[in-house]
Image (spheres, rainbow, N blue to C red):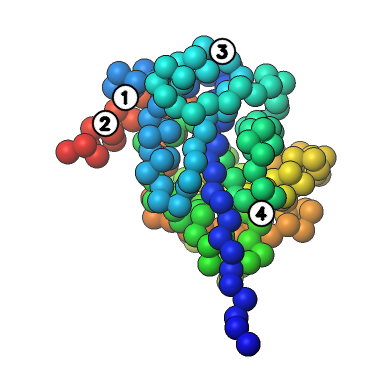
Amino acid sequence: MTDRVHKLPRFTGVIPARYASTRFPGKPLAEIMGKPMFWHVYHRAVQCTLLQDVYLATDDERIFQAARKLEVPVLMTSPEHQSGTDRIMEAARNLGLARHSVVGNIQGDEPALEPKILDQLLKPFVSADGVCVTPPARRIDHLEAKNPNVVKVVISQSGRALYFSRCPIPWSQDGSGPFLGHIGLYAYRYDILEKFQQMRQSVLEQTEKLEQLRLLEAGIPVDVVVTRYPCHGVDVPEDIYRTVQLLQERQT
């Protein structure tokens, strides 16, 4: 009697890139070292050894044409989407991905992305059945934990998320943690992504303004990957200077 062979899914990365942004309009087109930001994200993502395809998903003709000119695979998606997850789902559907395939949601404002984070994010789908969703997290100090813009997560002994919060969790009397800061990247099994996108916002999600809580409230397991690699997102134009420094350091 032979052991059942774990069939590897197809891994596809999608980079949502919308033009509108309250703090930084046109952010995907912001120039960094002679190329638009989306180009840097794409070229960091394709260095992931497990991704077979990477696409840009946008709602703007300017971004679409710039991507075509730079030979970045791009899909036009609806301007009505309320979140990057909705845009990812439309892109996955338009690509005709199989239901057992895995879709990576790669943030479009991470031009200095470390490709090894994506490999770590996808490896659980290689090694085991039953994996539904994987986000990464990194260890943070008590000062970062106090920042409500840094999402915290607590996990079980097996690495599954117990709760996400903007508050410092777990609470301790001396405030020492340990704390894990959630990184806004995800890999979803296609059928779970579809189910997630079709569900209504949950009570805890509305309370904390964290859509990943919708998964936990629905009983969908979230396997957290603890990484040592930080992320350096671009939120405002002033962040570009630091990004250029990071990219230049990696070239030396």
Residue shown at 67%/33% (left/top)?
94
Query: Mark 2 Cα within 10 Å, few/some/many (few <14, many 20+)?
Result: few
Query: Mark 1 Cα within 10 Å, few/some/many (few <14, many 20+)?
Result: few
Place of residue 27 in the rendered image (x, y in percent of width and height, measured from the top left): 48, 20
Place of residue 216 in the rendered image (x, y in percent of width and height, measured from the top left): 73, 54
Residue position marked by numbered label 4 in the rendering: 100
Place of residue 123 in the rendered image (x, y in percent of width and height, measured from the top left): 49, 59
Where the C terminus falls, by quadrant? top left
For badge 2, the amino acid type reads Gln
Q: Can you name the residue that lies furthest to the left here? A: 252
Taking depth in this image into account, of 88 and 110 the one nearest to the observer is: 88
Residue position marked by numbered label 3 in the rendering: 61
Q: CA distance from mark 1 to mark 2?
A: 6 Å
Identify the mark nearer the N-term, 4 or 1: 4
Identify the mark nearer the N-term, 4 or 2: 4
Front position among marks 3 and 2: 3
Residue shown at 59%/68% (left/top)?
6
Query: Mark 4 Cα within 10 Å, few/some/many (few <14, many 20+)?
Result: some
Task: Indicate whether 235 appears above or below 224.
Answer: above
For badge 1, the amino acid type reads Tyr
Identify the mark nearer the N-term, 3 or 2: 3
Residue shown at 45%/52% (left/top)?
50
Task: Indicate whether 181 appears above or below 126.
Answer: above
For badge 3, the amino acid type reads Glu
Give the SS element for disc 4: loop
Give the SS element for disc 2: helix
Residue position marked by numbered label 2 in the rendering: 245
Residue position marked by numbered label 1 in the rendering: 241
Taking depth in this image into account, of 16 and 229 the one nearest to the observer is: 16
Residue shown at 44%/27% (left/top)?
72
